[in-house]
Image (tube, rainbow, N blue to C red):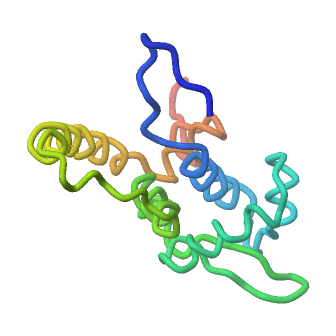
Amino acid sequence: MNAAPADTPARLLDRRDLLAITAVVDIALNARGRPVSAASLAERNGLRPRHLEPLLQALVHHGILKGTRGPRGGYELARERRRISAAAIVRAARATEERAPAAEGSALLRDVVAPAMAEVERSFAAALAAVTIEDLVRRATGSSGHAGEIDFTI
């Protein structure tokens, strides 16, 4: 993995996190009353289905997606777009990852670094929780969210 230049902040979301959010937005955009297959999702996003499947299963396990088996199976949102936050998707995506053991004997880590980074993570998590799939679908479609409203301007 390449290190970021010194003046570039570290990314708080890794590739897996971004892929999970992308998959859920893709499903929100393309489901249209029927499940979206992992193969079609992978094709649209330039991915291999076998690498995507474990991530989709994690999203099903955490109640973000519903999975349907069979030849016409695939994935759909498990709840309304406005009730799925980017933070929930990231939590689901990260739930299956193995974590590196912390340097538990380090006083510097325990007393200085971990508390400071926990504060940063809380701020980031709050901002991430405010972003919903509805928000991202609106960005993707260029919609202001007022579709169907009548404009009485003459």
Residue 47 visible here: yes
Q: How many marks?
A: 0
The residue that appears at 86% across and 61% down in the rendered structure is 40
- Residue 63: horizontal and vertical position, in percent? 49, 77
> Toward the viewer: 113 or 87?
113
- Residue 56: horizontal and vertical position, in percent? 65, 69
The extreme front residue here reads 105
- Residue 51: horizontal and vertical position, in percent? 76, 62
The residue that appears at 46% across and 32% down in the rendered structure is 11
Location of residue 8 by image quarter: top left
The residue that appears at 53% across and 45% down in the rendered structure is 149
> Toward the viewer: 27 or 144?
27
Location of residue 42 by image quarter: bottom right
The residue that appears at 51% across and 14% down in the rendered structure is 5
Location of residue 73 by image quarter: bottom right
Q: Quadrant of the C terminus?
A: top right
> Toward the viewer: 51 or 67?
51
Residue 146 visible here: no
Above or below, comparing residue 83 to residue 121 in the picture: below
The extreme top residue here reads 7
Is 2 placed left or right of 9 in the picture? right
- Residue 41: horizontal and vertical position, in percent? 79, 58
Q: Quadrant of the N terminus?
A: top right
